[in-house]
Image (spheres, grey):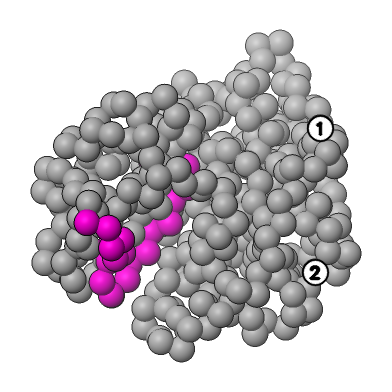
Amino acid sequence: MRYSTLSIKTIPAGLIFCLAICLGIAAVPSRPEKQIPSSPARAGWTFLLFSMADCNLEEPMMEDLRKMAEVGSNENVNLVVLCDRAEGNSNEPLLNIRNFTSAKYLLAQKGSFREIRDLGELNMGDPANLLNFISAGLAAIDAAHHPGNFLFVDLGTNGELVLKKGTRFAATSTAAGPAFEGMTISCGMLALPGAVYKAEERDDGGTAVETVGDRPARGVCGTGLIDLLAAALRQGRLSRQGHIVDGSKKIPVAGPVELTQKDVREVQLAAAAVKTGIRMLLEANGTSVADLDTLYVAGAFGNYLNIPNAMALGLLPRLPTEKIRFIGNSSLAGARAMLISAVERKRCEALVGKIDHESLARGAAFQELFVEAPEFKEWS
């Protein structure tokens, strides 16, 4: 079925960086200091939400948290949130929590939140946090025992990348932004009924689209965005530099839905960030696209992404299709593996220590490559 279900990463509309892990163990323990409240009561399941909104997604993130409080935790399920809010919004209360000048662990209760732990100033981009996040995704593909060289690409807001070369792992992330999730696109939306998720050129020069649930088009989700721009590129309605050739500077989609020049720029920047991250990660480790045995594609639309179209825009490197594998919501799959197997959990914990983090964005080379990367064209 087409988008019959949504991955946990796509459900919370306002989340910049989201990892939902259901753990059949006690929730996060509290610090020993007296002023810190005790841990949540032991429940059959704990749902952990890693949530950061250091941009214009503050409002939808807050709405997601309010909905969690409407449900609340109970004797069977704990709802625990690690929340780091956007700068400038920390003085606005969330229900009974008044002070948000620091990151917090919160337990959702019926109509309120209980503070489990104040983490102070927490850098969500810290390598330790990144490695903890991607380790669950890597467990889903049994990364440590996978033969050959592979590249793991999580196409989301932060564009997590992991390269395995021989027995060595290297990881990084790029600030792709939420364009692939439809959040900075004028007609963007999640893969909900009415979202254009697929587009193909017609013989008459037009474009045929398909929507989730076969409903009238009311927006475009990530996969539809890639298809529409690739089609416009082939039809000559969009230049490789990203200019809409039509004088109206609009790309009609269906009914009132259309893409603007700004929408195209958002995709260019997102694709350029991913492309630059991949190139630099490969170069830093003395390898190339040709050396890859497998490319794993994860993320919100991993199972529905049209790979030839993604390659045409330069989002992914050109590779034989037999080398590309979709793994969908890898973080959830990895978490599931750890839940049902103590062996898998220990193996995942051991894997974290084997991954080297490389901060690529700090170097001048990143900026130089990034400036050249927005052009829509294939690369290898």
The amino acid on which the numbered mark 2 sits, given as a three-letter code, is Leu
Which residue is at the front of the view, 168 or 188? Answer: 168
Q: Quadrant of residue 94?
A: top left
- Per the image, the residue denoted by label 1 is 371
Give the Cα separation between the discs numbered 2 and 1.
25 Å
**Residue located at (63% from left, 41% from top):** 175
Q: Earlier in the sequence, mark 2 or mark 1?
A: 2
Please count the marks in the image. Answer: 2
Task: Report the amino acid beneath label 1.
Answer: Val
Q: For the residue carrying disc 1, how many other residues have a C-alpha within 10 Å: few (<14), some (14-19), or many (20+)?
A: few
Indicate whether 293 appears above or below 236: below
Residue 344 percent across, percent down from the top left:
47, 84
Is 32 part of what is drawn in magenta? yes
- The dot on residue 292 is 2
Q: Bounds of the magenta span?
A: 13-34
Residue at the far top in the pictured view: 247
Location of residue 270 (image quadrant):
top right
